[in-house]
Amino acid sequence: MANNQKIKIKMLENNINNYTELAKKLNTNRQNVYNKLKNRTKWNYNDIQKLIVLLNLTPDDVFEIFFN
């Protein structure tokens, strides 16, 4: 299960203020992002790669969010 609170913090730090904005940047729909942030579905490899770039995630961030 991902640490979605950390993702939300990183979103705000990178001026991404809502699920719709993040969805557009991930090239998906809002409902898909909402489900992932509510742990109803899992983040896939491609989404994680995009999040690393969009949210300027460090290797430590990635570990804390997805593997801790």
Image (cartoon, rainbow, N blue to C red):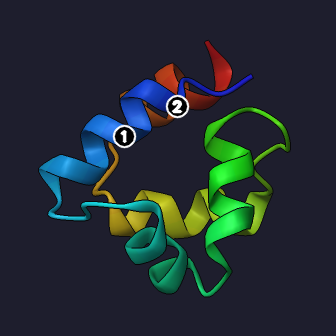
* Residue 34 horizontal/vertical position (percent): 64, 53
Can you say which quadrant of the picture contains the N terminus? top right
Please name the residue shown 61% across and 12% down the image.
68
Please name the residue shown 61% across and 41% down the image.
37
Q: Viewer-proximal residue, 29 or 44?
A: 29
Packing grade of label 2 (10 A; few <14, some 14-19, many >=20) is: some
The answer to whether 28 is drawn above or below residue 43 in the figure is below
Which residue is identified by label 1?
8
Circles 2 and 1, Cβ within 8 Å, touching? The answer is yes
* Residue 25 horizontal/vertical position (percent): 45, 82
User: Is 38 left, or right, of 21 in this rendering?
Assistant: right
Q: Viewer-proximal residue, 30 or 26?
A: 30
Q: Secondary structure at mark 1?
A: helix
Q: Secondary structure at mark 2?
A: helix
Quadrant in the rendering for residue 9? top left
* Residue 40 horizontal/vertical position (percent): 83, 37
Amino acid bearing label 1: Lys
User: Is 28 left, or right, of 50 in this rendering?
Assistant: right
Label 2 and label 1: CA atoms lie apart by: 6 Å
Disc assigned to residue 32? none
Amino acid bearing label 2: Asn
Please name the residue shown 74% across and 49% down the image.
35
Which residue is at the far top?
Answer: 68
Q: Viewer-proximal residue, 31 or 26?
A: 31
The answer to whether 12 is drawn above or below residue 9 in the figure is below
Which residue is identified by label 2?
4
Please name the residue shown 77% across and 58% down the image.
45
The answer to whether 33 is drawn above or below residue 26 in the figure is above
* Residue 64 horizontal/vertical position (percent): 48, 20
Q: How many marks?
A: 2
Quadrant in the rendering for residue 28? bottom right
Q: Viewer-proximal residue, 6 or 18?
A: 18
